[in-house]
Amino acid sequence: MSEPRTMFQKIWDAHRVLDDPASGETLLYVDRLLLTDSSSFHAFDILENEGWTVRRPAQVFGVPDHFSPSGGRTLDAVDDADRRARIEDLKRNCAHWGITQFGMDDRRMGITHVVGPEQGITLPGTIVLCGDSHTSTHGALGALAFGIGGQSAHVLATQCLWQKPLKTLRVSVNGTRAAGVTAKDVILAVIREVGAGGAFGHVVEYAGEAVEAMSVEERLTICNMTIECGGRGGLVAPDEKTFAYLEGRPYAPKGALWDEAVAAWRQLPSDPGARFDREIALDAAAIAPMVTWGNTAADGLPIDGHVPDPAGEPDPDRRAAMQRALDYMGLAPGTALRDVTVDHVFIGSCTNGRIEDLRAAAAVLKGRKAKVPALVVPGSGLVRAQAEKEGLDRIFIEAGFRWGHAGCSMCVGMNGDTIGAGKRCASTSNRNFVGRQGPGARTHLVSPPMAAAAAVTGRLTDVRDLMSEGGAA
Amino acid sequence: MKPFTHHEGVAVPMDALNVDTDQILPARYLRKRKADPDYHLYLFHDLRFDAEGAERPEFILNQPAWRGATVIVGNENFGGGSSREAAAFALDAFGVRCVIAPSFGDIFFSNCLKNGILPVRASNEACARLRKMLHARPGATLSIDLEAQTVTDPEGGVLSFDLDSFARRNLMKGLSPIGLTMEHDPEIAAFEQAYAARAPWAVL
C-alpha cells in the first residue's frame, strides 16, 4: 500500500514535470492560465521583449475585469485613457496569440474568478493560475489554484511554474450553521482564527460537515478568501455537488470523456489517514454573522460585538496596528458594532458576486428601501442575466440600488467606482485595506444579506433582526 | 533584471504590521505601464502624499535622513494581500534593492525576486533590533552580501539569512527565468504528451 496522500499531494504529484534537487523546487505543469486586464499587459511586454511565444494558447483565457466600468458595456463608458488602453491591450494580446477572451461586449464576461468556474474552465485536479491573488477561489472545485503575480509571462511561455512544495493546513468546520450565517461569515471566522498571515506557505483544505453541506457557490466564497490569511490556495474535495455543478458547462468535458474525468476526480479527496502539516477545527454552530472593524480581514467580530480597545493588547506592534486601524476607520474602542452608521453599500466581487449571493441579498431587500447609496454588481454577465430572469434586478432597483454591469468594481475601485475619503462602506468584497475602495475610504466586510441589512437601516445590522421581522427569507 | 550581488544603502525602519501591497502601490496606479517615468512617485503614494499631492512630513520616507533609502526593514506580513507585481516595480523604480522582514506575502516575495529586489526573511527579534537601531541612527546604512547571505549593521553586527540556491543564482546573475526553464523543453514536451493521454480533459 502506498502512503495515504492529501488532495494537494495528489494534484502536485500528477503535475510534476521534474524536480530540481539543488533548489528543492518542482517544475509543475499548468492546466489553465487566466489573464486579467490589470496585470497581463506586463506579462505580454516580457514575452515581446524576450522574444518568447505562447506555448498552449487554448489553455489560456482572458477577461477584462478590473478596469471594466459598471456603468455600461462599451469602451466609451471607460472615461480614462489608461484604463481603456489596458482593456484594449488584453483584447489585442489575446487576439494576437489566439487566446480566448471574454471581452466587455461578451455576455459571458465577468470577474475572472466567477467566469472560470461558470464556464467549466476550472476543473477538479487541475492547476489553475492567474496573476491575481484571489485565484484561490477556484480551489472550491478541487483545483490547485493560486495567484502568481509576475510569473504569468513564465507560464505563457512554458506552461509550467517552478514552485517549492507547499505545506498543508486542514481547516475542519464541524457542525451546522445557524440561520442567517453565510459562508462569508464562516470564512471571516476562520481568518480571524488563523490571522492575517497565519497560513503563509500553506494550501488550506476546508473540510467538515459544514463545508460538505455548502453549495459549490458557498465553497467558492470560502476558498476565495484563503489569501486573506496568507494561504496560497484553498481546496475543497470534489463531490457529487461539484460534478453536478460542472456537468454541461461549456469547457467541461463531454460524453465518454466526462465519465472518464469524473472517475479520476473521485480519486482526488485526501486519503483517510493523510497527514496535514497543521490542523484546526471550528464549530459552525458557534459562528454568528461577522463584520470587520479594522484593516485586515482577520479583524472580524460577531455583529453583536464591540470595537476592541488597543489598551488591552499587550504586544506593542499589535497595539500600534490596532490604534492605527481605529484611527483610519474613525472608530472609538467599545462602540457597539451595530451602532456604526454606513454611508454606502456594495454587493459584488469575486467573493460574493454569484447568483446565490444576489438572491440572499434580494431576499432581505424585498419590499424595503435602502437608506444610503448602494451598488450591486453581478460577478458576470451570465449572473446578471440570470438575476434579471428571476426579477432580482427589480428588487434591487426598487430598493434604491444601482444595478451595475459585471466586473470587479468597488471591491478595488480600479474602474473608478470608489467611495470618498472618510466615507464608510458595508461591502461584500474581500479586502478592507487602507484605501481599498478609494483613498481614505473605510470598508467593513460583511456577507450579502448583512450588506442588504446595512443598506436598509443605514448602519451595521444583524440581519437576523430583519429576518425575525418577517418579509425576508 | 538588475543583478544583485552586494548592496550597501540607507535603511529605513518601517514598524507597521501588515504593510499590504495596496499600501506599497495603490490600486489606481495599476493602470500605468512599468516604463512610466513617474513610477517612483507611486511607491507608498497615499502614505507619502496627501490628497493635494503635498508630502506628508510624518511619513518616514519623507524625512531627510531616509529620503534616499534603498533598504527597508519591515515587520510581520510585509507585502501581504494583492498579487500585484507592480508593487515590486514601484520599489525598484524608487531604488529599493532589499526588504528585510520577519514574514512576507508569498506572492510579493516571489515578485521581488523576479524584479531584482532581495527579500530577506529574518526573525522577529532580529528585525525589531534592526529597526530600533535604525531609528536611533537616522540615515545609517545596511550592507547586504547575497553570496555570503549576510546583512551587516552599522554596529558591526552580522545577520545571516537563507535564500534558496536557485533564486540566489538567478538574482545574482539577473537571469530570465523563462530562458532557464526553456532548457527543459524536452522534458516539458514529454510530460505534456503523457499527461494528455492520462488526463485528456485537461489538455485543450
Image (cartoon, coloured by chain):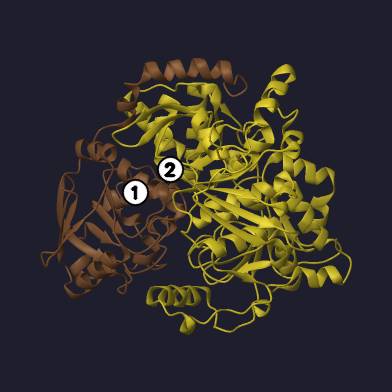
Q: Colour of chain B?
A: brown
Q: Chain ID for label 1? A: B
Q: Name the foreground residue: A166 vs A42.
A: A166
Label 1 crowding class (10 Å Cα cut-off): few <14, some 14-19, many 20+? many
Q: Secondary structure at mark 2?
A: helix
Quarter placement of the N terminus of chain B: top left
For label 2, count other residues whose C-alpha is less than 10 Å away and answer few (under 14), some (14-19) or many (20+): many
| Position of residue A66 measured from the top left corner of the image (x, y, whole percent) | 54, 46
C-beta proximity under 8 Å, tags 2 and 1: yes
Q: Are marks 2 and 1 on the same chain?
A: no
What residue is shown at x 36% (from left), y 49% (from top)? B109
Q: Which chain is yellow?
A: A
Instruction: State the count of labels.
Output: 2
- Residue to which mark 1 is pinned: B88
Image quadrant containing the C terminus of chain B = top right
Q: Nearer the viewer, residue A115 or A175?
A: A175
Spatial CA span between label 2 and label 1: 10 Å
Looking at the picture, which amino acid does disc 2 mark?
A: Gly
Q: Is residue A447 left or right of residue B38?
A: right
Q: Which residue is mark 2?
A: A149
